[in-house]
């Protein structure tokens, strides 16, 4: 997987350990305004904060479990 496609140019080549602590707007497609809204609504400041946000985890679980439902 080429992670460089998922991050802004200035974060290309960074280690995953560095990216975890990068601001959420390091993710390609997340604007400064989006980052401000995430911070205001959920106190999300970093990629780790976003990835471990309970609402994101719940949504992922629902989507994954839906495929097992009959």
Image: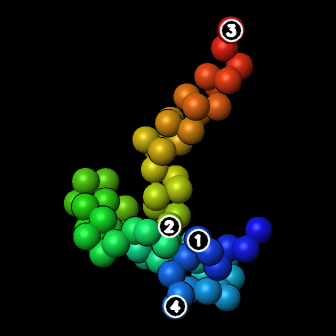
Local SS, label 2: helix
Local SS, label 4: helix
Residue nearest the viewer, comparing 43 with 29: 29
The 10 Å Cα crowd at callout 3, few under 14, some 14 to 19, many 20 or more, is: few
Marks 2/3: CA–CA distance: 34 Å
Q: Which mark is residue 10?
A: 4
Which residue is under mark 1? 6
Q: Position of residue 43 (x, y in %)?
A: 31, 60
Tag 3 or tag 4, which sits nearer the N-term?
Answer: 4
Q: Nearer the viewer, mark 2 or mark 1?
A: 1
Q: Is residue 17 above or below residue 68?
A: below
Q: Which mark is residue 70?
A: 3
Q: Are marks 2 and 4 in contact (CB under 8 Å)?
A: no
Q: Position of residue 30 (x, y in %)?
A: 40, 68
Q: Which mark is residue 33?
A: none
Q: Are marks 2 and 1 in contact (CB under 8 Å)?
A: no
Tag 3 or tag 2, which sits nearer the N-term?
Answer: 2
Marks 4/1: CA–CA distance: 12 Å
Which residue is under mark 2? 47
Q: Is residue 20 above or below residue 10?
A: above
Local SS, label 1: helix
Using the rendered view, name the quadrant where residue 36 is placed: bottom left
Residue nearest the viewer, comparing 1 with 50: 1
């Amino acid at each position: 997987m080429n992670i460089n496609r998922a991050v802004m140019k200035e974060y290309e080549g960074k280690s995953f350990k560095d990216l975890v602590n990068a601001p959420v707007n390091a993710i390609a497609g997340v604007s400064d305004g989006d980052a401000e809204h995430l911070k205001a609504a959920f106190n999300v400041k970093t990629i780790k904060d976003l990835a471990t946000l309970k609402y994101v985890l719940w949504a992922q679980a629902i989507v994954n479990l839906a495929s097992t439902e009959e």
